[in-house]
Every structure is written in structure tokens, then in C-alpha cells.
Amino acid sequence: MLNLPAFPAKFLIFVNKNTHTKNRFMKPRSLVDIGNYGKDDILRILKSAAKFKANPNRDYLQGKVCATLFFEPSTRTRLSFETAVNRLRGRIVGFSDAATSSSSKGESLKDTIMMVSNYTDLIIMRHHLEGSARYASEISPVPIINAGDGANQHPTQTLLDLFTIYETQGTLENLTITIVGDLKYGRAVHSLIQGLAHFRPTFHFVAPEELKIPDKYKQFCDKLAIRYREFSDFSPEAINSVDILYMTRVQRERFTDLMEYEKVKNVYVLHNDMLADSKPNLKVLHPLPRVKEISQDVDDNPKAYYFQQAKNGMFTRQAVICDLLGIEVE
Amino acid sequence: MKKELQVAALQNGTSIDHIPSDQVFKVVSLLQLDKLGNPITIGSNLTSKKMGKKGIIKIADKFFREDEINRIALVAPNVNLNIIKEYEVVDKKNVALPDTIIDIVKCNNPKCITNNEPMPTRFDVIDKEKVKLRCHYCEIRIEKEDIILK
Ligand SMILES: [Zn+2]
């Protein structure tokens, strides 16, 4: 009965995109967002990361070229990815900040991605614009790894956090995790909550009033029946009963009221004596860089695990790269 | 007493009645009527018992697909949309908010890729009742009163 008109171009895009979303339920082709990784995906990556930790130098990427496109500079993350590729004997092309890339000449992200995907087998990108990695994954014929898109996502950070928790606790199930510091803006914190959600965690959120965990994440926990408590001071109660103490930076620029910052800046700092009555299996993690929130005297405590955590980033990234390229890790 | 029609009757086509008067031209643009060659009658600021003032659009020999109709759900969710054949209403359609809204709404996050790259926007409707959207790219949530059309 209906007299169908010719499809305008916009609707053709609509149809294509719909088919694309179906891919989200298959084995992921790109790593954009930790929310797209189910429990099985996470465990598969962690198992493979453990194999790389036992033996990091392998020739799985022989003959392959990976791009590191850092539209926004991040030396720490870039070195971790590039070392991961190097230890797999892959080659790397790319740039370390937008000033040396063609985007400084006004080239669109799409054109840069299309050009680089002509040359490479995988693209690792960091960009200051939110959603840039998702968009790149929709247009790129090769897998995309999101190495941070503005304040939005940084999924390999989450996977390395999960790997470190798994490694130190022997499990991810039924753990109690205290998260301290900037819970409002902390991207690593939000993704960690999402990533751990598959494993029946209990959270203790310790933050100053101005940087409390947003309602969105409390609702997320409520919906999944995940237990949590909120603390406004960094009390022994939040340390002594838990398995993981995840510290983050409280940054001055996040405060609208600088008086408030002055009041709290020394409150959310971990000193070695505060760990005296903690559980034997407790480990202290931090996404790094740290400023003052973990005092130097903690570093020699065997419960301090943030430097090993950073090192685990490399093994986790080796695992992610191989997973996306369909390489079986022996 | 003979009642005078405010807008001429339609022989075949689609009639969209009870459009809020201030949204008539948005409906025109969302349905891309400006690109059609068909005869189109547009009435605005007509008197309506129900609404005070209303708009009405009649498009001759044009029948929309559901996803086209649903494009107007954000601006005019309560219209009466009738399919007319030989001056008779043969079908009535309801406008429904789709699960996904492509390239109609602007993202409110200035740091979103969609505001910095020539590309269509895309929003998932996370609450149809309260009309809450989430950007498919930057994941920001937008409440009904903050929705801006592109
Ligand atoms: Zn957006």
C-alpha cells in the first residue's frame, strides 16, 4: 500500500549504523569503552596478560605495523603501548602530539583515520575530544584501541587495574575496594566501577564533598545490587576491612572554592602508619602519576603495588593488541 | 450551517494535524518537505478547540515510512497523522520516539567529537517517558528541556 520514496542519503547512514551496533554483541573488534567488554572478554584478556607477564618477548607481531596516534600528548601511556608493540616485534608509526600531525592543518579525524588505516594493521589513539575513538572505530577498517578520549574512557587503564587486582588477590570475585580522592571527575574510577561490576564487589567511596561520586554511578550500583558506602573522611574503617585501596589525585583545579581545597588537600593522603592494621592481602593501587596523595614512606611497604601496576599496563596492552588482531596467545 | 474548511481537503496523501503552532516549520524541516516536489499545504496559527492555536500540514501523494514520521517525535509527539485515499482516512499513525535519534539533536558537550567533526550525531533514547537522551559518542546525558535541535 505504502508508496516508498527514494531513500535520502541520511537514511542510508541510519541503516548502516544499525547493522554496525550488532557487532557490539560479537567478540569486540575495537576496544573503545570498558562497558562493551563483558565478563568473558575481561577474563580472556587477563589470562592472556598473565602469559605475557611470564614471557613478554614474543614475535606475534612480526610483519605487522601498529599506529600510535596521540592527538593529545601522554608520554606514559604512549611508551607503555609502544613497548608492548616492540616486545611483540611489531613496527610502529605515528605521532606524539597533534602539532606534528596533519590535524594541525585542519584535516578531519575521519581523513586521518582513513589514511593511517591504509598503512597499518591496528590504530592506538588518544584524543582530547570525547567520543573520538568510538567514531574512529565506526569508520576504520582496522581495529582501534582507545588510549583515552578526553574525560570519557581509557579502557586499557581499567584492564590493567583489573589484572593487578586479579594478580594480587587471586580472584576478582567478592572483593571490597576502597576508592579515595577525586570520585567526581576521575575517569579511571568510573571505569573501574564499571569493570568490577561483573564480579560482585563492595565499594567504599572516600571523597571530599565537592568531589563525591556522581549519582549516575550510585544508580548504576543500585541497579546491579552492588553494595557501597560513602565516607567523607579517610578513616581507619575505610582501610582496615578492605582488599584493595585505590588512591587517586585530588587536583586543585577541580575545586570551585579554593578554601575548600586547602581544607581537604591533606585529608586524602595515605601515610605508611595508616596501613598498620590493614588486612594482610591489602594492596595499594594508584593510576599514576601521583603527586602527594601517597606519601613516600608507603613506597617500601610490600602492600604498595602501584609501580608493579604500571608495569602490568604493558602486559595488559600486549594482551589487548593480540586479542583484537585475533592472535592466539600460547 | 456549512462549516468552512480551514485548509483544503486532500484527495490522496498524508495529513498531519494538531501540530503545535510554533513547531510547524520544524516539522517541515525534519520531514524534509522543502526537498519534495509534491503539492504541500501548510496552515499555521489556525484555531483549535483543543489547543487554541495549531498547525496543519497536508502533503499530496506522499506516504511516509515509520522512521521518517518518528523524526518529528521530539517536537510534535501528539499530532494526528492520517493517511488519506480518495478523501477518506484509511489509516491513522502515531508518532513514537525511536530508540535511536540520528542527526536531529545537537550534543550539548562542546568537547564531543560530533561538535568538532563533519558527522551525523546519534543519541540513544534512555527514557522514552521523560525523554532523556544519551550521546552515543561522548556518553553525556541530556534531559528533555536541554535538547537542542541541529
Ligand atoms: Zn556527545
Image (spheres, rainbow, N blue to C red):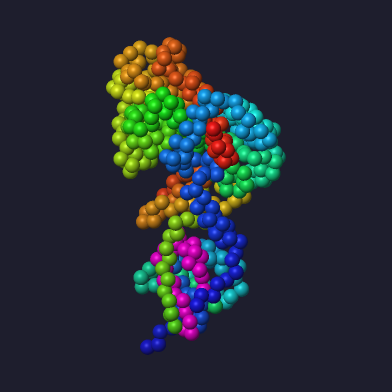
Residue B30 point in image, percent of width and height: 53, 63
Horizontal relation, residue A324 to residue A231: left or right? right
Residue A64 point in image, percent of width and height: 66, 36
Residue A184, picture quadrant:
top left
In front here: A13 or A268? A13
Residue at the image position 61 percent from the left and 61 percent from the top: A9
In front here: A128 or B49? A128
Horizontal relation, residue A42 to residue A131: left or right? left
In front here: B134 or A197? A197
Query: Eyeballing the image, is A263 above or below A191?
Result: above
Query: Eyeballing the image, is A297 above or below A282?
Result: above
Confirm whether residue A104 shows in the render. Answer: no
Does residue B74 show up magenta in the picture? Answer: yes
Horizontal relation, residue A138 to residue A205: left or right? right
Residue B36, picture quadrant:
bottom right
Query: Eyeballing the image, is B4 above or below A226?
Result: below
Residue A128 point in image, percent of width and height: 57, 36
**Magenta residues (range):** B62-87
Q: Quadrant of the N terminus of chain B?
A: bottom left
Confirm whether residue A20 shows in the render. Answer: yes
Residue A280 point in image, percent of width and height: 34, 18
Q: Quadrant of the C terminus of chain B?
A: bottom right
Residue at the image position 45 percent from the left and 24 percent from the top: A286
Does residue A216 show up magenta in the picture? Answer: no
Q: Residue furthest bottom?
A: B1
Residue at the image position 57 percent from the left and 53 percent from the top: B120
Q: Total label count?
A: 0
Residue at the image position 57 percent from the left and 25 percent from the top: A56
